[in-house]
Image: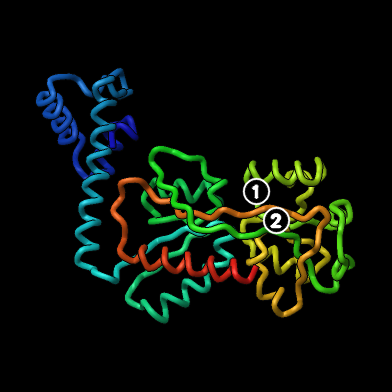
Amino acid sequence: MLAETGSFSRSAERLFITQSALSRSIRTLEDELGGRLVDRIGKRNLLTPMGEAVVVRARSLLLEAEELRRSARQFHEGPGGSIRVGLGSGPGALLMIPWLCQVAQHHPQVRTQISRGATEAQLQMIRARQLDALVVDVRRVVPAPDLTIEWLAESRAGFICRSGHPLAGRRSVGIDEVLDYPIASTPLADEVVRLLVERYGPRANPRVMTRLECEDVGSLVETARRTEAVFLGIVAAAREGLQSGELVELQLEPALQGLARFGCVTLKGRTEAPALRYFRDFVRQTFEEAARLD
């Protein structure tokens, strides 16, 4: 706590002890370790190099202790327990409602929490142990030594519009014709941006052509269904509208050859919640069914 606040008084207040008790604890630890942990410079309290090393190790020990308690809880919870998962924009459109229904119908003893939002924010939640797993397009995740990235499935991407759209029903459509209309898409990975530019030229750079952008694919698909906007994203996310005939996929020339590459991101070395096995199996099955529809 002292490392965070830099103040004995504020630290003591947060720990619900007296300032003198905190000072005695620090001095006792310094005596045991044989060196100073804190330099007291006027009203400022700064960690010494030894103090910084101790804080790093102490934080690691606290995380290990929490993992031990978590493992014990999961052992006693058995096949029930809880699971906290994050879903990226594409996976959210495909998985969120089906997963909630699956749990409600077949695993009602499992407590489920779902997080949606930007990939960067959800990765922070993974590292803070606020999420058990994150399913996302892995091209938006920078590999790191503390993360485990498990490949799950691929899903084809395309341009989708409403059935009454001026471009609907045409045997082939050029990218310049598509760009006459608002493009609705999620933020795309750099690799996807490069592929689109290579395929269709600089105008197809999503950072230039995308006029409607958000993380919620369902909202983007619905916007395409109601307006002249064209949705750019995974085709499976629009499967209900495509099956009903309300939406159609544009036949671009040359054809779009993009694929979303979905994976499951977890924190390396963390004890896995028992319910996460059910979730992984469900995700794989759902993606396989979506691929068949493609």
Residue toward you, 199 or 39 = 199
The quarter of the picture where the C terminus appears is bottom right
Residue at the disc numbered 1: 188
How far apart marks 1 and 2 lie (CA) works out to 8 Å
Q: Residues within 10 Å of mark 2 (few under 14, many from 20)?
A: many
| Picture coordinates of residue 108, whole percent (x, y) | 36, 78
Tell me which residue sits at (42%, 81%) in the image: 105
Position of the N terminus, as image quadrant, is: top left
- Residue 235 in which image quadrant: bottom right
Q: Residue at x 72, y 80 (%)?
A: 244
Image side of residue 67 versus residue 201, left or right: left
Q: How is the image coloured?
A: rainbow
Q: Cβ–Cβ below 8 Å for labels 1 and 2?
A: yes
Query: Which of the 4 image quarters holds residue 73?
Result: bottom left
**Amino acid at pointer 1:** Leu
Horizontally, is 213 left or right of 114 in the view? Answer: right
Image coordinates for residue 186, horizontal then vertical, percent? 66, 54
85 is higher (above) or lower (below) than 270: below
State left or right for residue 168 relative to residue 9: right
Q: Amino acid at mark 2?
A: Ser
Residue 34 % position (x, y): 12, 20
Looking at the image, which is closer to me, 28 or 238?
238
Residue placed most toward the observer, 268 or 32: 268
Mark 1 Cα-neighbour bin, 10 Å: few <14, some 14–19, many ≥20 = some
Say which residue label 2 marks: 185
Image vertical order of residue 243 relative to residue 205, above or below: below
